[in-house]
Image (spheres, rainbow, N blue to C red):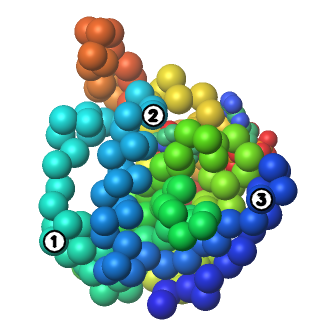
Amino acid sequence: MKIDPVTVTLKNNVTVTIRAAVKADAAGMLDAGWRYLQESPHFITTVNEFNFTKPQEQAWIRSLNESDNSLLLVALYNNKIIGNIQLRGEPRSKIRHNALLGIAIRKQWQAIGLGTALMHTAINWARTKGALKTIWLHVHATNEHAIALYRKMGFREAGRQPYYIKEPDGRFTDNLLMGLLLE
Ligand SMILES: CC(C)(COP(=O)(O)OP(=O)(O)OC[C@H]1O[C@@H](n2cnc3c(N)ncnc32)[C@H](O)[C@@H]1OP(=O)(O)O)[C@@H](O)C(=O)NCCC(=O)NCCS
């Protein structure tokens, strides 16, 4: 286990657990992943493109767990995955001090502090572990809620890709690159 399990009481007074993902989470992660995509327009992957198999998901969990600059955490309520966060560390030697962050939370668990708790836990791990210098993330420029969370956690805008995302209705959305320097 990369971190000891943490319990967090959210703004609705419900206590949830945050822990490192294990191989046995693969089915729950796939189920949650499919639901995140149904519930939010702010992902690049579309529902139709989310077709990973359980062995592929198990391999992905293992690869993050075996990599010393990567982390995969799940948030659980009643043993069900309600959110997750990952830091995917770069494997090549010249850039392995960088990781790409991804986060998602089930709709009914949004806006009550879980994103903040997951980010705190992941960033604390990165600071303590010391393998990373910078955490990066991509976010739709229209995703005000996520951007508010990232700014609150200290991330700053580092770049903007105009027209990067083409929405299903044909409109274009800019992509933001944000970064956090761990020092
Ligand atoms: C974006 C996301 C990760 C944020 O997590 P969360 O648990 O909902 O966020 P929190 O409750 O911790 O709130 C974080 C900050 O966001 C802001 N915020 C909260 N609710 C908000 C809302 N409804 N609209 C806009 N901003 C909001 C506040 O600044 C809040 O900080 P505060 O609690 O100190 O006031 C989560 O909502 C989510 O998974 N959304 C769908 C998928 C997604 O957008 N993922 C990110 C892709 S880059």
Against 141, residue 72 (above or below) is below
Residue pictured at 31% horizontal, 65% vertical: 27
Ligand 1 falls in which quarter? top right
Mark 2 residue element: helix
Residue pictured at 30% horizontal, 25% vertical: 165
Q: Is residue 125 visible?
A: yes
Lower sequence index among marks 1 and 2:
2
Against 118, residue 7 (above or below) is below
| Residue with the mark numbered 3 | 14
Q: Quadrant of the C terminus?
A: bottom right
- Between the residue at mark 1 and the residue at mark 3, the CA separation in whole angstroms equals 33 Å
For label 2, count other residues whose C-alpha is less than 10 Å away and answer few (under 14), some (14-19) or many (20+). Answer: few
Amino acid type of disc 1?
Answer: Pro
Q: Is mark 1 within 8 Å of ligand 1?
A: no
- Between the residue at mark 1 and the residue at mark 2, the CA separation in whole angstroms equals 25 Å
Q: Is residue 42 visible?
A: no
Residue pictured at 48% horizontal, 53% vertical: 103
Residue 48 on image: x %, y %: 19, 35
Amino acid type of disc 2?
Answer: Glu
Mark 1 residue element: helix
Amino acid type of disc 3?
Answer: Val
| Residue with the mark numbered 1 | 55
Would residue 106 be found to the left or right of residue 55 on screen? Answer: right
Residue 75 on image: x %, y %: 56, 65
Query: Which quadrant of the structure image shows residue 177?
Result: top left
Lower sequence index among marks 1 and 3:
3
Q: Nearer the viewer, residue 133 or 31?
A: 31
Q: Nearer the viewer, residue 47 or 67?
A: 47
Q: Is mark 2 within 8 Å of ligand 1?
A: yes
